[in-house]
Amino acid sequence: MKKNDGDQILRQKMEELGTLDGGIVFGREEAWDKLQSRMDKKPALVIPIKIRMAAAAVLMIMAGATAVYYSSDFRLVKTGNSGPGRHDIKNISGMETGKKEAATELTRVNIDKPNKVTSPAIVHYSAPTEKLQNKTNSPAWTVNDSVISTVPVSLPSPVAKLQIPANKEMKVVYIDDVEHSRTEKKQPVSDINAPVVKLDLKAMPVNYIGDVERNEAEFRTMLRDNPRTLVRNIFARPVYQEEDYSPQEYTQSHKFMKGIFNNQN
Amino acid sequence: MTEQKAIEGCKKQDRICQKYLFDTYSDGMLMVCMRYVKSLPDAEEMMLNGFYNFFKTIDRFIYSGQGSIGGWLKKIMVNECLMHLRKKGLKIVNETDASNTATDDGIISRMNANEIYKLVMTLPEGYRTVFNLFVIEGYTHREIAVMLGVNEGTSKSQLSKARMQLQKMIKERAL
């Protein structure tokens, strides 16, 4: 729809119209005072939306973590030599025969589900495990509560009598002395009398430029034939997982790279 | 004081320069706001908001001769008014029935500005807004559609209806 002449006239007339012509009366000075006071006001501190969102996210994560920690079935318990733990339960069910080294460790144990034998409170350390195994045909990791309750338990007497020979005088050892004797460390002593090793520069291997060039040529040929070799060897690093570790392969690649760089230098 | 110097002064937050521009343009800007918002207190509020935004964002303004300040201010005022109308709940129903109706040049040229203004103000809010934006402010239908969040066809239809109603009123008045 194009603008016609009538629109142009209308536009001109409307733009020419002032407040007084339109019969509008307004206090300009009052309006200016209002505007001035508004401009003098310090702007409220506006925190950027990104920071607000980040803070909200952090709070939510913290709240979630707290809720999970307090409401979850899982709790961190300490297992170790001091009492029956996860490894002992495994032995009862006959799943594991070899005795594991029960080092002190933090293990997640389900304490709220009684059918899954995970609570150390149900199984006693001194319970005859063989009998239990014969009576129950339940699969590994499960033990009936009823069976456990019928197993006679013979707990060891809690107090041990110390038998001290009456005639023998006991040596008094102070705890401070023991601690000091443990913490004392021998200061490193430099061995002044050690034989001085002189470097025989003549006996050291000399790299000739021809050898270096030959090695380089060999290296280039190898790289051209199998470009992955370089990458694999550069990124070769010791592997700590038992199944992946192959010392022979690692040593070979290490020697290979060492050879290249030594010759080039 | 020239406009350019006033602008430079405003950029340095000089109150005298700000007052000069306010005195020069407040009248016209109030009229712009009055075309969109009927009540005087609301229009005054819109005008003050507009000037406040103008002085706050004056660093972005580049003076390019006579009329550039007026144009810039008018855009700010129109935006303020549209925001106000949107908040108030201005609803324009999407329509596509647009017949090309032109305003009668002869009758309009014979009428004075105040009469035209009063007639325009009797139009319904939706018609009046589109009519003001298209005829007086000079926006295209596409721009109006974007500003009001309606179809281009709706803008055309609203304008057509506004014109028809205006014609009718002018004829009635002439008789």
Image (tube, grey):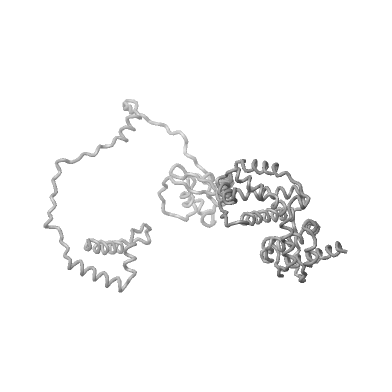
Q: Would residue A135 be seen by someone viewing this image from the given angle?
A: yes
Percent position (x, y) of residue B17?
60, 45
**Residue A239 appears left or right of A75:** left
Residue at 26 percent across and 64 percent down: it is A256
**Residue A160 appears left or right of B78:** left
Percent position (x, y) of residue A199?
14, 52
Q: Would residue A146 be seen by someone viewing this image from the given angle?
A: no
**Residue B8 appears left or right of A79:** right
> In the depicted view, which residue is nearer to us: A93 or A57?
A57
Percent position (x, y) of residue B77?
67, 53
Image quadrant containing the C terminus of chain B: bottom right
Residue at 62 percent across and 50 percent down: it is B54
Residue at 84 percent across and 62 percent down: it is B169
Percent position (x, y) of residue A147?
56, 50
For the image shown, how many numbered marks are present on the structure? 0
> In the depicted view, which residue is nearer to us: A218 or A160?
A218
Q: Residue furthest bottom?
A: A225
